[in-house]
Amino acid sequence: MISHPGWSETSYTATAVSDDPDQQVEEVIGMMRGYVEQDYRAPEVAEQAHQAMARAGGADPVEAVFHHIKGQLSFLRDETAAMPMQPNHDIPIVEVLIRPIDMATMCASGQCRRAGDCDDYAMYAAALLMNLGVDVSFITLAADAADPTRYSHVYLAAYPDGRGGRRVAVDVSHGPYAGWEAPDQWGKRREWPVGSGGGGWMKWLARGGLVYMAARMGGFA
């Protein structure tokens, strides 16, 4: 167990990921998908999803989840989140993932105000939306004009009417409203459907706590 500023004592595991930037992103997205697929039916996540709908007066679930999370979280960069763990490791911690069940638990007790960056926002939103029956995908984007070859941001695409219907961007960490989407004028964008099975990634998953990955390349902003 560790003591983290702003969070209760938290268990965690470390997983090394590839030094190749695109392969690293694929591995991290695989973990994120696995966490969402495991957690979205959990009672803790269901309670937060129901609270989102109740606060929105039964409005569109995408709008409800977007505003619910905006009212709960404030951005915390991985560099800051990783500081208590970094002295235990010789290589940089480039990602800190807070799985949805833990984020929901933290939010229920008021501890998630300073917790998470874009990947944590995206996982939490994905789990809440899937609990409400909305199909989602992760979207990775090369959003840094200085390096248009590297994926540097992740958010969601939601399909409230099913995957063949309406698409709504859900960028809870950076978007001013549901439907806002950063332009891909600098680089590349890729969509990763969630809910199609985590496959081999399930072996990495363990209930509870932070998961951080140590590697040498940069992660998501």
Image (tube, helix red, strand yellow):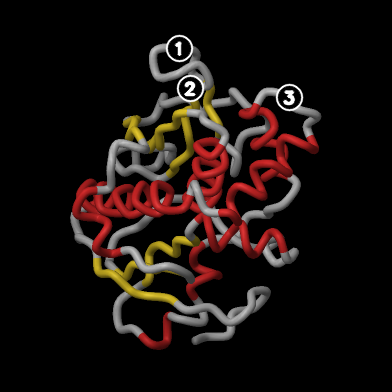
Task: Return the x and y of residue 145 as percentages of the image width and height.
Answer: 42, 37
Q: Which residue sits at x=68%, y=74%? A: 6
Q: CA distance from mark 2 to mark 1?
A: 6 Å
Snapshot quadrant of residue 179: top right
Dot 3 or dot 1, earlier in sequence: 3
Q: Are marks 2 and 1 in contact (CB under 8 Å)?
A: yes
Q: Which residue sits at x=47%, y=69%? A: 208
The image shows residue 145, relative to residue 34, as above or below, that is above
Q: Which residue is mark 2?
A: 159
Give amino acid for label 3.
Ala
Dot 3 or dot 2, earlier in sequence: 3
Residue 172 vs residue 217, the one in the foreground: 172
Snapshot quadrant of residue 107: bottom right
> What numbered label is drawn on residue 165?
1
Q: CA distance from mark 3 to mark 2?
A: 15 Å
> What numbered label is drawn on residue 206?
none
Give amino acid for label 2.
Tyr
Q: Which residue is mark 3?
A: 59
Report the side of 215 relative to 3 (left or right): left
